[in-house]
Structure formats: structure tokens, C-alpha cells
Amino acid sequence: MRKYVIMGVQGSGKGTQAMLLAADLDLVHISVGDIFRWNVQHHTKLGAQVRRTMAGGELVGDDLVEGVVKTRLADHDWNFGFIIDGFPRNERQAEFFLESYDIDGVIHLEMPDSEVRRRVMARRLCAGCGMDYNLLASTPSTAGRCDVCGGELVTREDDTEEALAVRLRDYHQKTNPVLDIFRRKEYVVTVDARPGRDIVQKEIRERLGLPPLPAAGQDGPAAGGAAAGR
Ligand code: AMP
């Protein structure tokens, strides 16, 4: 059983790297942001509670977030382990998490703010299936349309200059202390998130002592494909 946390500022590719790890290692990828976005899209009660906060780039309240994480992990569908993305994001969440779960490692994707800005502004999301695209890395075969389902590619509501500035400020103020907590337990591997996604994935696996990413076509979505960048 392997339990990992992946951390990094928005646009550093944590969703993509988490999915690549999850696919062949049979880990369940848990993205707190995706759970919230699903609830917003489906107009649930939780969606209504978090929509404005998310659109402004602010962090959702700890009680709500902890409730969502607890409920999701209580499903126990993670026989081989999980990789949790976007959580914990502050000291309180980190303490809550460490009280309940032992973790095997924290992957910290490092990226300068200037590069984050460039990537986030090029990020698009399929309104149909939720697939992420980064127009810097690859363009879809039909402009503005998802390669997988043909849905319309839209900008995330929180990918504006204003919301990004708030998120970067929050990240540096609140998330860095979380890394310090994890560093005290010697869990953290810091990886430069700027190279291509397969290079970043290789580095993560080497540093965690995990088997290499299977070659494309052998098992799971290794190299290539359109999605990148979250
Ligand atoms: P993400 O997809 O990880 O960028 O998350 C999108 C948004 O969901 C964030 O900007 C927050 O509004 C909210 N969110 C996700 N994870 C958390 C968390 N751990 N704590 C508070 N808010 C969160």
C-alpha cells in the first residue's frame, strides 16, 4: 500500500503527474479541486457552498475540505493506495491529515511564479468530460474542441490574473509551512516541474524508488496525449 501527497502551485502539473503515477501503480487519484468542480458543475449543495470562493481563487474553509477528504477516503476503494492532490493546503489541514493517515511520501513540484502565470493562462478545460489541456504543450486537433469527447474547451473560472494572484499569495503564505511540517518527517521529494511531463515523472519515480513509467501502449496513458498542466 502506497500513500502519497502531491503538492505544487497551480499549473505545476500536479494533476497530470498524479494521474501518471496512479495509472500503472493502481493508486486512486484523489483531487480535492476536482471533487469541488464536479459539485459546482452538478449544482449540488456543496457546489453552491464553494463556487464563489473557488471563482475568487480563495481557499475553501477547512471544515468543508476536511469533511470532503474524510468522506472520500472512507470509501476505502484504495486497496493499493492513493495519491492525494491539492490537499493539505495549510497547517491545520496537514495536522488533521497526519493524525489520521500515515503517508509514504510527499511529492513537491517546484515552479517559479512567472512560469506558473504563463502556463495557467494557457490552460483550458473541456466543458464536456473535464479533461485538462494546456495550449502551450499541445493544441487539440480541432481548435477549441476536446480530442476525447468533442466538448467545448473553456477557461476555468478561477484562471484569471486576479484569481491567480490570490492563489499564488495563498500558496506561498499557507502551503509552504505545510512543506516544513512534512520536511520535519523527511517525507518530501522536491522536483523541478519545468521540464516535459515524462521527464518530471521519471524524476519523481526515481526519487521515490518506484518502478519506471511503462512505455506508451504497454500499460496506461504514458507518453503523448493532449492533457497536461494542472
Ligand atoms: P485545485 O484544482 O487544486 O487548484 O483547486 C481548485 C480550488 O478548490 C482552489 O482554488 C480552492 O478554492 C479549492 N480547494 C481545493 N483544495 C483545497 C484545499 N485543500 N483547501 C481549501 N480549498 C481547496
Image (spheres, rainbow, N blue to C red):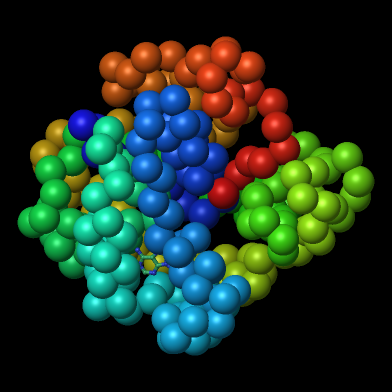
- Residue 7 visible in the snapshot: no
153 is higher (above) or lower (below) than 182 = below
Image side of residue 24 versus residue 224, left or right: left
Residue 19 on image: x %, y %: 49, 38
**201 and 120: which one is in front?**
201
Residue 36 on image: x %, y %: 46, 69
Residue 224 on image: x %, y %: 69, 26
Give the residue furthest to the left: 99
Ligand 1, by image quadrant, is bottom left
Image side of residue 53 versus residue 224, left or right: left
Image side of residue 25 versus residue 36, left or right: left
83 is higher (above) or lower (below) than 89 = above
Please name the residue shown 90% across and 50% down the image.
143
Image side of residue 19 versus residue 127, left or right: left
**37 and 190: which one is in front?**
37
Please name the residue shown 40% across and 73% down the image.
59
Please name the residue shown 63% across and 41% down the image.
228
Specify the quadrant that holds the N terminus.
top left
51 is higher (above) or lower (below) than 194 = below
In which quadrant of the rendered view does residue 65 lie?
bottom left
- Residue 148 visible in the snapshot: yes
